[in-house]
Amino acid sequence: MMQDNSENQTIDMMLNMGPQHPSTHGVFRMELRIDGEKIIDVKPHIGYLHRGSEKLSEGEQYHQVVTLFDRMDYLANFNNELVYCMAVERLLDIVPSRRTEYIRVILCELNRIASHLLYVGTIGLDAGAMTPALFSFIGRDRIQTLFESISGARMMHNYFKIGGLKEEVPTNFVSMVKDIMPEIRQDIDQAEKLLTFNEIFLSRTKDIGVITADQAIDYGLTGPCLRGSGVNYDVRKSEPYSVYSDFEFDVPVGLDGDCWDRHWVRIKEMDESLKIVEQAINNLPDGDVESSLGRRLIRPSAGEVYVKAENPRGEIGVYIVSDGTDKPYRLKVRPPSFCNLSAIEPLLQDSWIADSVVILGSLDIVLGEVDR
Amino acid sequence: MIGSMSSYFQDAVSTLISLLTLFSFLAVIVLSLVWLERKALGRLQLRLGPTRTGPFGLLQPIADAVKLVLKEDIVPNDAERVIFWVAPIIVVISAFMLWVTIPFTPGIVVENLENMGLFYIGAVGVIGILGLVLAGWGSANKYGVIGGLRAAAQLISYEIPLIMVLISVAIVTQTFNLVDIVNLQSPVPFVLVLPLGFVLFFVAGLAEVGRTPFDIYFAESEIVGGPFVEYSGAHWAVFFLSEYINTFAIATLTVLLFLGGWSGPFLPSIVWLLIKIYAVILLIFWIRGTLPRLRIDQLMAFAWKVMVPLSFYLVVCCSVYVFYEMPWWALTVMSLFGLVAVGVIIYRYITAPARKVAEVRERLRSLQMTQEE
């Protein structure tokens, strides 16, 4: 006898992940369609942290916009400040002093290390290991304490000014940086050695979330996510900005484009950043860090500018249109996190629920920057 | 007639008293475990752990308990109320039931079930799964359902090697009585006779109590606590309690079955037992502080491709040993052979990604060399 099975069909389950989920790295929401433990389809929803930074900057004077950039990628404040300041400087056609540039590069590279250290911690948490997070915060704390003694704030520094720095660094800046360098190297080792070649971590990340080089370029991935797929592209090398052409460093590249390769690229990048800091601090020029503009209002002549730089998360671009007033007419940011996040759909297809968390973690997004 | 009545009454009273003693003893044990875990994990992670509540934060578990009991007990609107309330009770009762027959010394045991001891443990240990599945289902939460189903899959899979190890111990000792099993270990603890059994039991035990790297059914970063996601306050505390009691039970069984139980020189036997149990528990905490979590399919593959075949191999070894009346080291040799097999299997299958990494590094090196040329 035939049985009526019409009511016993398997249907996909809709699983809502986020915005209140511990592993979505902020207020990000994924609508997963799952079949058992497998993900069939994913629909990402962003915008929960939208603060309208781009529109807000149209109402702020050029000097004031720096604070808004601090709050976009809140794990790489200095890098964000740098790219904005560079954009306005190019609009004004001024060049900051070499000392300014060197200090900026030192701070940016230290910030890159701090950001990557946080990544090591969070990928550990995503994979279920809680200890790397606490180990990595030791190094991060050292760096942040240094930042605090320089700029007065552990995050949201507001330290780079257009054409210069807010103020001269403390007199013991060089010795401070030199002191924490070996300690940071040790901290990085301590944090990542627990994870990188751990068998379980390898089985959780190797061959998971693979994106080929072609696909990565198509989706506009940049930074470690692109280099993890084997594409040797780093704005610091391909179009050196600031004083990056003065330093010798390598661009670590992965091969397979899986989560582990992205992880490995970040680990190696921290070593390269330390190299840059070492070279910069040993050759720190004397001079002035005051902006040649003084404290005047800035009124760039009408025009537009696009400047890009390498952030810890990838290539950030800033596009400013000036109409000759003291406020930008239009300001547009190309945030690396947003573009990297766009690859989440192909990456998550046919993966496991547990993998979705690791893959998202390996993209290392900052929602403050995705939503702006 | 009156005499038998009064002896029946006496029996009932003494059983009740011993049950209450067991209950309060386990409660104290759980408090100590909470403190120990927080402190040990803290030290592993270069933190201090609790320090503010009492000396060395010793009162922290009590503060935790008070906080949890005072918390509002929320029941979700869509929850199946009866199931939602019954699930934690099932879990905690099964956790306590396990302890009825576990001896601390030959004298200290609620009710030694003589020739049913191991059998009873194997039978009762499974009931808790029901509670977890019901908790996930009853809370009408998708994360809860996924967690409950994961729990069912995981716990049932690892129950098989666990029970197979119990059976092989029973084959070797020819008894189900835990006291006899411990007494038989007086010259040579079974960890030397059955090293494979020890490893299998410990790993399956970790999975059974959902400890890292097998904490998959309440994986915080994926399914946010699984079956417990909707529970709060006292109900959550009950889950917490049973989890620690189960951890303690697995550690105790490991000690009783493989590490010689309460036997040891100089110190009283109960002290020896507790020292050994806490050593095993510290090992569990250490693993928790070190390892990431497996994925559910990897976990199941590990259970069915590695653990189950090896546990059957162990049973066969033990049977052969008993049948041919071999010396005890013959069993060690056979057991070690199995462990080597585990090593090979792990090397072949589990470290496949690691080998791939080595390959990648090799390719990178050759790539760099060609660039330099």
Image (cartoon, rainbow, N blue to C red):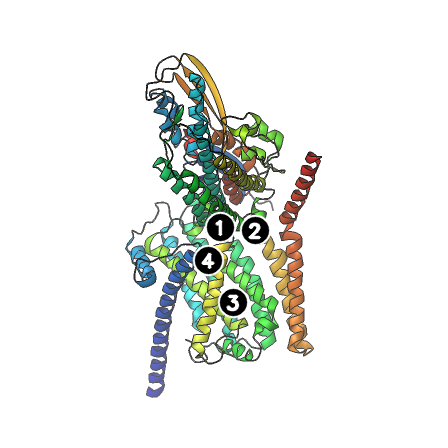
Q: Position of residue A275 (x, y in %)?
A: 53, 38
Q: Label 2, secondary structure: give it.
A: loop
Is residue B35 visible in the rendered structure shown here? Answer: yes
Disc 3 with disc 1 on a shared chain: no
Residue B122 tag number: 3
User: From the viewer's perspective, is residue A268 above or below residue B86?
Assistant: above
Q: Position of residue B3 (x, y in %)?
A: 34, 87
Quarter-wise, where is residue B103 in the image? bottom left
Q: Label 3, secondary structure: give it.
A: helix
Chain of the residue displaying label 3 = B
Q: List the residue tagged with mark 4.
A: B130
Hey, what amino acid is under mark 3?
Gly
Residue A198 tag number: 2
In the image, which is nearer the foreground, mark 3 or mark 1? 1
Which residue is nearer to you in this view: B275 or A237?
Answer: A237
Chain of the residue displaying label 2 = A
Q: CA distance from mark 3 to mark 2?
A: 33 Å
Which residue is nearer to you in this view: A139 or A280?
Answer: A280
Please give left or right for residue B359 compared with residue B142 in the image. right
Q: CA distance from mark 4 to mark 2?
A: 34 Å
Chain of the residue displaying label 1 = A
Q: Residue furthest left?
A: B70
Q: List the residue tagged with mark 1.
A: A129
Disc 4 with disc 2 on a shared chain: no
User: From the viewer's perspective, is residue A219 above or below residue B84?
Assistant: above
